[in-house]
Structure formats: structure tokens, C-alpha cells
Image: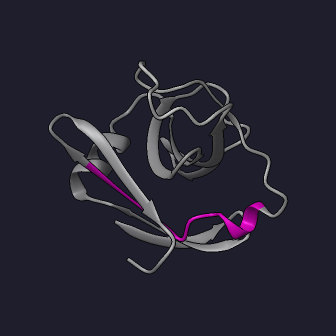
Amino acid sequence: MKQQFEFQGKSFTLTLTDAAQRVVTERATPLVAEMELYFSCLIRLKVRFREQTDLSNSMKVMDNLHLRFRPVMTAQCDLNYEGDEPPLTDFPIAKPEAFVPHWLKIDFRHGKLEGEFGYTES
């Protein structure tokens, strides 16, 4: 499935493989695909799939799938952090529309949903 729509003021393309679409359609509860733009020493793009009851900051794109874009940052740059990931906080951006991705691809592999997003045409 491939669909185009406006997301946070930008043209956006969402692609789900057949396997991902089947998993999402068969869900009993909504799932949020959160596109996380991580600012720290480096920039990282990550898609997190979250079980959500609060969908107020997300956009519904299918019955059981919502999208959210979330810029985050760490309090400090620590390349020697010993945990899985340092604590994150929301990153306020003056013009967030300049950072909203252009596309998101979701697949279901090895028993879990996986996603990637980007800023140039895929």
C-alpha cells in the first residue's frame, strides 16, 4: 500500500508492505509510528512503534495506524554513555515544518514492525 497526503504542512508518502499492512489491519488497538529526529553529537533518524491510548498529537492514516513526528535531544553529548540510550527530551524547533520528513516506509520482518523515513525522494 502506498498513499500520499499532507502531513504537518508537507506532501508525505506512506508505504506499507503487504505484511505490515496485514499486521496493522489485524490489530485490536491503535499503534503510533513515531518518526524520531534525534539531535545530539550526531543526528539519528529512528521509527518507534508505540502502543498509545493518547492519540492527540498524532495523525490517523489508517484505522489502526497513526503518525507522529518528534524531534528530540539529549541534555548533553556523551559518546561514552553506558546505557541503551541517554534520557531524551523534546527538542523545540522554531520552524518544525522544515524538518518534517517526506516519506515513511513500514515493513514487518522477523516478527516485528520496522520503519525508516527520509527527506529525499525514496
Q: Is 99 colored magenta in this rendering?
A: yes
Colouring scheme applied when the structure was drawn: one colour
Return the residue found at the far left.
110
Q: Is residue 78 or residue 10 the one in the foreground?
A: 78
Q: Which residue is drawn at 36% across and 51% down?
A: 115
**Is residue 6 shown above or below 66?**
below
Return the residue found at the far right.
94
Q: Is residue 74 or residue 22 the one in the foreground?
A: 74
Which quarter of the figure is the N terminus placed in?
bottom left
Total marks in image: 0
Q: Which residue is drawn at 79% across and 54% down?
A: 93
Residue segment shown in magenta: 96-107
Q: Is residue 114 or residue 20 the one in the foreground?
A: 114
Q: Which residue is drawn at 33% across and 37% down?
A: 26
Which quarter of the figure is the C terminus placed in?
bottom left
Residue 1 in the figure: left or right of residue 34: left
Residue 106 in the figure: left or right of residue 11: left
Residue 64 drawn at (x, y percent): 48, 41
Return the residue found at the far bottom.
121
Residue 87 drawn at (x, y percent): 59, 24
Residue 57 in the figure: left or right of residue 38: right
Return the residue found at the far top.
83
**Is residue 92 shown above or below 26?**
below
Q: Is residue 21 or residue 39 the one in the foreground?
A: 39
Residue 25 drawn at (x, y percent): 36, 43
Residue 121 in the figure: left or right of residue 32: left
Q: Which residue is drawn at 41% across and 19% down?
A: 82
**Is residue 20 shown above or below 76?**
below
Residue 119 drawn at (x, y percent): 51, 71
